[in-house]
Amino acid sequence: MALTTRGGGGADQAQPPPAPDASLGFLTKRDTEVKLPRATRVKNKTPAGVQITAEQILREARERQEPEIRPPKQKITDVHELADYRLRERKRFEDLIRRVRWSVSAWVKYAKWEEGQKDFARARSVYERALDVAHRDHTLWLKYAEFEMRNRYVNHARNVWDRAVSLLPRIDQLWYKYIHMEELLGAVANARQVFERWMGWRPDIAGWNSYIKFELRYGEVERARAIYERFVAEHPRPDTFIRYAKFEMKRGEVERARRVYERAADLLVDDEDAEVLFVAFAEFEEKCREVERARAIYKYALDRVPKGRAEDLYRKFLAFEKQFGDREGIEDAIVGKRRFQYEDEVRKNPLNYDSWFDYIRLEESVGNKDRIRDVYERSIANVPPAEEKRYWQRYIYLWINYALYEELDAQDMERTREVYRECLKLIPHKKFTFAKLWLMAAQFEIRQKNIKAARQILGNAIGMAPKGKIFKKYIEIELYLGNFDRCRTLYEKYIEWSPANCYAWRKYAELEKNLSETDRARSIYELAIAQPALDTPEVLWKVSTCNLKLTKMNLIEQENSMRDCLIEQST
């Protein structure tokens, strides 16, 4: 926008725009011509005398709106005008449905208008034409049947309902409306027949319940019982059996209700909702004052329902025992609750071995051998995922405790031997081993007076995964038995496996010294000292020096004693 000024002579003269700054090379001539308007200053900042709110503005706008333009009311005075009106409306409706043929609401409006004109044949014709277009729309069938019912064409309505349920048998609303019409007319037999047709399509639980309630409304208890039998056969679920049992209980048929629960317990023991069934069964027996029956049901359910789905069952059982049980029963219920907690923990994290230890201690305090063995077997089945010793250190004690339990508590020696055998097979000995487990297995065989098996276990340990503890214990056992040749062989293997181990050299030399094999001991010390890299050479030198001094002192004493003997003989 160019700025202009009024000159003295009356002519408008355009002022040229200022030249752009040469330093701002990125600006164009157009950029320099644009000027931003200055901010308007508010001169009077005092509040207005009359305050106007947004609500007042909206109300005034609504009040000042012009009235809606409505068509004038038309009064029909004779037959000719009525005929013209009907012709115009029918033409309008026909044009409408020609444009939107698939619009169900357009057809319904057309049919309702014809109904308002009391021309029922035309209205029926409109509905039939609409069904040719959208016979899968159940709302159209409902409107059609309601039209016939509203105008008391009962047989026509029945015809419409029959056609509707034949074409759309999975729409429950059509069945309900059909049956409701028959009940309003008092045609109970017809309503029952419709129900039977519906049940042939295997509806959901709501359909069966409505059939049963229908029979009970008319006092047909035996019919309702027969329907319940078909119902539980069609939908074998805990809630359906519970409904059936409550139906029998409401009529005082306690034995019938018990038989229903027993059938359900046998049939649905593995169902995912079996907990609900057993709780209802136990509460039923509790209401019948059958306390022992209820307790047996709770215990039966706790043994069979998975622990992850038995939370409500444990809570109910604990409340039941607190109400009816003695001290022992309450303790059993508390143990059951703790058992459930441990089951939940090991289910969430099966590699949490501390939880398994707590669970095992709980079962051992109860004393049920089958349960204890089951928990042990489940715990040792959770093998650590990585072959690293730090992950196996807690896990291996499960096996050790299992073996000790079988030996000391269960007194089953064959099972103990099998536990040790399976554990030693499981450990990856090429990467790491547990000397404690080898030694415990060997000591168990010694306690069973089977030295051959113990030697075989320790020999396998030395061959597969040699460790200093195994050599020491094996040598100790053979030394105790007096098998010095075996001890020499083991010391040789020990030194061969770890030639830098001064302890092995020293103990081997001490063995020979104690057997009065001085030359052997001296040779062992010389071989040990000749090794290039010993772990504690100073100890070995000290021991060998002391032994040599003792040997010299023994020789001197022998010479002195011989000289004394010779002197005595000469005198």
Image: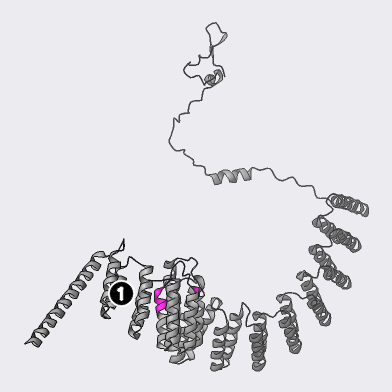
Front-most of 154 and 260?
Answer: 260
Q: Residue at x 80, y 70 (%)?
A: 169
- In the image, residue 120 above or below residue 398: above
Q: Quadrant of residue 552?
A: bottom left
Front-most of 570 and 194?
Answer: 570
Rendering coords of residue 510 (x, y %): 27, 76
Q: How is the image coloured?
A: one colour
Q: Specify few, some or many for label 1: CA neighbours under 10 Å numbering under 14, 14-19, or 20 or more.
A: many
- In the image, residue 190 above or below residue 72: below
Residue carrying label 1 = 508
Residue 438 belongs to the span the image colors magenta: yes
Tell me the quarter of the image containing the C terminus.
bottom left
The furthest residue to the top: 9
Q: Quadrant of residue 30?
A: top right
Front-most of 264 and 214?
Answer: 264
* SS state under label 1: helix
Q: Residue at x 31, y 61 (%)?
A: 533
Rendering coords of residue 19 (x, y %): 51, 14
The furthest residue to the left: 571
Q: Amino acid at mark 1?
A: Tyr
Q: Which residues are magenta?
A: 426-439
Residue 554 belongs to the span the image colors magenta: no
Q: Horizontally, is 530 left or right of 559 in the view?
A: right
Rendering coords of residue 32 (x, y %): 52, 19
Q: Residue at x 67, y 92 (%)?
A: 256
